[in-house]
Image (tube, rainbow, N blue to C red):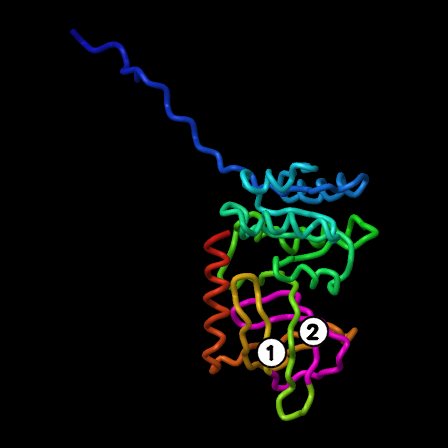
């Protein structure tokens, strides 16, 4: 007898798996800033969750790709909870308010970027746009990681040393900010520490300085073997994110 019926599978096809959206925890933020920041993240496909008094426990058990919290003394316990959590130890931490100097008080926790107060929508969107790739884990090996830590800059061939604050770091160099005057071409040796990276020293050259004169970049000396420690830290950071 001819086969007139088409074969019909007895099981339903498996549903297509959907990648979970990245989430940012907004911790103890007040209105209207809380809504503005949430809208900025949502614009780049990042969901937000509002955390309150239970934020420390939530960060221990729930996975978030980023968090935003006020740069004030209570933030230390929250950052400690995040960095000691296996699931959130590499999360991107945004500070709210304060300055880079204020962020240095929490440098051991690796504050990545700051939303300035009073909040301004265009500036907030610009900050999220600049850091979204890390939050979304869409990373490349040339990525620049935003992080705020204190840097000691020794100007070689001069008896001069000054402090700077980091802006971004890559395996090839670092951008930073300082009121000290230094021009392009200067040979320097910088030292700093980052989260799980103990203090490291590396030589480099000032490769650019902006018109305002406070931000400048240092390109690491390719012949300085010590820069390998920086590259290894960045690779581990990206792989764990």
Mark 1 element type: strand
Q: Give the image location of residue 104, x and y in percent.
A: 69, 63
- Give the label on residue 190, or none: 1
Q: Is residue 42 visible?
A: yes
Please name whichever residue, 162 or 123, is drawn nearer the observer in this view of the structure.
162
Mark 2, secondary structure of its residue:
strand
Residue 176: horizontal and vertical position, in percent?
A: 67, 71
Residue 207: x and y in percent read: 63, 79
User: What residue is rendered at 64% in x and 83% in y?
Assistant: 154
Nearer-N-terminus badge (1/2): 2
Residue 123 image point, x, y percent: 76, 54
Q: Is residue 207 magenta?
A: no
- Left or right? Give the position of 54 relative to 121: left
User: Distance of mark 1 from mark 2, alpha carbons?
Assistant: 10 Å
Task: Judge whether residue 165 is colored magenta.
Answer: yes
Q: What range is drawn magenta here?
A: 161-188
Residue shown at 61%/76% (left/top)? 218
Query: 28 or 123: which is nearer to us?
Result: 28
Q: Which mark is residue 164?
A: 2
Report the residue at 77% width, 76% height from top: 179
Disc 1 to disc 2: CB gap under 8 Å? yes
Is residue 45 visible in the rendered image? The answer is: no
């Amino acid at each position: 007898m001819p086969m007139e019926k088409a074969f019909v599978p007895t099981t339903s096809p498996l549903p297509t798996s959907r990648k979970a959206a990245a989430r940012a925890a907004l911790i103890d933020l007040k209105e209207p800033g809380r809504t503005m920041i949430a809208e900025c993240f949502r614009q780049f496909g990042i969901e937000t969750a509002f955390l309150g008094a239970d934020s420390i426990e939530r960060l221990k058990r729930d996975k978030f790709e980023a968090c935003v919290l006020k740069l004030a003394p209570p933030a230390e316990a929250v950052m400690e909870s995040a960095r000691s959590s296996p699931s959130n130890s590499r999360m991107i931490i945004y500070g709210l308010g304060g300055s880079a100097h204020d962020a240095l008080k929490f440098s051991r926790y690796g504050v990545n970027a700051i939303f300035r107060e009073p909040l301004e929508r265009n500036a907030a969107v610009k900050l999220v746009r600049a850091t979204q790739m890390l939050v979304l884990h869409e990373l490349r090996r040339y990525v620049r990681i935003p992080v705020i830590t204190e840097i000691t800059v020794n100007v070689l061939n001069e008896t001069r040393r000054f402090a700077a604050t980091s802006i971004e770091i890559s395996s090839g160099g670092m951008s930073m900010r300082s009121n000290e005057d230094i021009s392009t071409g200067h040979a320097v040796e910088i030292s700093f520490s980052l989260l799980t990276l103990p203090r490291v020293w590396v030589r480099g050259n000032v490769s650019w300085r902006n018109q305002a004169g406070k931000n400048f970049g240092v390109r690491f000396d390719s012949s300085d073997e010590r820069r390998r420690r920086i590259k290894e830290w960045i690779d581990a950071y990206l792989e764990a994110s």
